[in-house]
Amino acid sequence: MWPLGQYDRLVHEIKRREDNSIPVTFGLLVADFNQQRCRDYILNYIDRFDYKSDRYINFYLPGYLEEDFHGNNEKITIKKKNYYFGREVYLKFLNKLEDDFMIDYPYNPVLILLEYDRGHFSKTKRIIIELDSDGSDIKKAGELFEKIFEIAKKSVSIQNFSKSLQKNSLKQGILDRIIEGIDNSYLTAIYTQTKEVRKYKLNK
């Protein structure tokens, strides 16, 4: 888990790892420190997620800075190092993410898995998982992350993420329709905008 701070850092990381033969695969965990449930069930375990993600896939946290400019206690700790939540930086990051990647502005915590293969960011393949939307159980977020890290150990690509998650814990959904009540699964498909965009939510 890598706190990113500003949006320019994300662009730098993508371009730094860009390769003509291998897509850049990474995750974005959009987590607002000011949301109580997000703190309780996601941010409180961020050190664990960092440990489990290991070297298999990079996960970035928008809006968290190494510097504490405001003297507040809105912080997370990874590997015994503190990172401070900058709300203005966080909000600007999400605005740029919406403009460049064509990802709807997230008002609740989401996990976004992306695979960038050159060109404009709007063409990036993505899987968007809503962690605390209506009808979701954010308490299952930790289990979902563990599953993703397990899959990432085998092969870090969006195609394998998608196939493995569907095989183990997803059911096919209907466009623009939320499917609820799927037993023994982590996620419900919400919609597929294009072949490049898939969106899900955690089940209750």
Image (cartoon, rainbow, N blue to C red):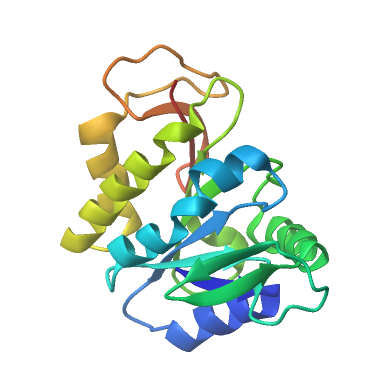
Residue 141, image quadrant: top left
Q: Would residue 71 be found to the left or right of residue 115 on screen? A: right
Q: Residue at x 29, y 61 (%)?
A: 52
Expressed as whole percent of the image width and height from the top left, the position of residue 46 reads 46, 59
| Residue 42 x/y as whole percent | 50, 48
| Front residue of this view, candidates 175 and 113 | 113
Q: Residue furthest top?
A: 181
Query: Quadrant location of residue 171?
Result: top left
Q: Quick check: 119 left or right of 114?
A: right
- Outermost residue on the bottom side: it is 16
Q: Residue at x 80, y 79 (%)?
A: 69
Front residue of this view, candidates 44 and 179: 44
In this rendering, is residue 122 above or below 23? above
User: Which image quadrant: the C terminus?
Assistant: top left
Answer above or below: position of 125 versus 174: below
Q: Position of residue 157 (x, y in %)?
A: 30, 60
Q: Position of residue 40 (x, y in %)?
A: 55, 43
Residue closest to the eye, 152 or 101: 152
Residue ranking furthest to the left: 154
Residue 165 is left or right of residue 3, and the answer is left
State the quadrant of the N terminus: bottom left
